Amino acid sequence: MEVFLTLSIRARVAYGILCLEQTLRKLGYDYDHWQFLLDTLWSYTNSNPGAWHMIAAEITPLSIVENSAYNSIDFECITLEQYSLLKRMYSTIPKEYFVIFELIFEIGTKDLYSSIVNGSKETYGFLSAIVKVLEENKIEAPDIPKFLIRQGIEENYGWGNPFYRKDVFVA
C-alpha cells in the first residue's frame, strides 16, 4: 500500500472507484445499473475537482438516504429522477459499504481548498481504509493499473493530469 503515497489525488480517486466497482461486482450488481453514479464519480479524473465536489456531495449515500424526500433546496445539481434512482440503488446495497462511497468523496475533496502537502497522507489513509473494507468483507482489492502508477503525486501540484476511465485500461 506504500504505492498509494506516490499516486496523484486523481489516481487515488480512480483506484477508490475501482475498489467500488470490484465491490459491486462481488455483490452481483450490474455496472450498467450503477452507471449514472459511477460515471459521476469517474468524472473527477477529467474535470475540475471543485465542480465535481458540488454534484458528488449530493450523490453520496448519506446525502440521499438522510433526505426522505427530494427537495430542490437541498439538491441543486441532481434532478428528482436522479435522486429517485440513487435512492433505489442505495436501498439495495448493504449499509456497511456506504463508507466506500464516502471515502472516495473524501479523497477527492480533502485538499480541495488547500495545498497538497506531505503527499496528502490523509487521502492515503482514506484509500487504505477502502482497501480494509474490502479485505474485511473478503473482497479482493483490484491490482493497481500501471496507468495509475504513472500518475504521480508530483504531477500538477499533486492533483495529477486529467484522464478518463478508459485510459486506465488501455495502458
Image: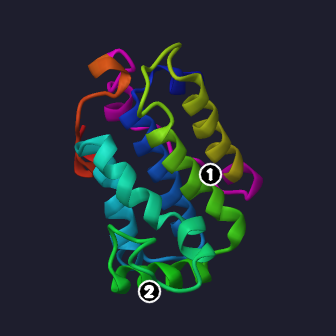
Give the residues in magenta.
134-154
Amino acid type at mark 1:
Glu
Q: On residue 84, which mark appears?
A: 2
Residue 168 visible (yes or no): no
Image quarter of the N terminus: top right
Q: What's the magenta bit mostly, secondary-structure-wise?
A: loop
Q: Residue furthest front?
A: 73
- Say above or below: 51 vs 36: above
Per the image, is 121 magenta? no
- Along the line of sight, the residue nearer the viewer: 72 or 16: 72
Q: Position of residue 59 (x, y in %)?
A: 45, 66
Q: Splitting the image into 4 quarters, where does residue 50 fall? A: top left
Total numbered labels placed on residues in the image? 2
Q: On residue 140, which mark appears?
A: 1
SS class, disc 2: helix
Q: Position of residue 105 (x, y in %)?
A: 49, 49
Question: Is 134 on the left or on the right of 58, as rendered?
Answer: right
Q: Position of residue 82 (x, y in %)?
A: 36, 80
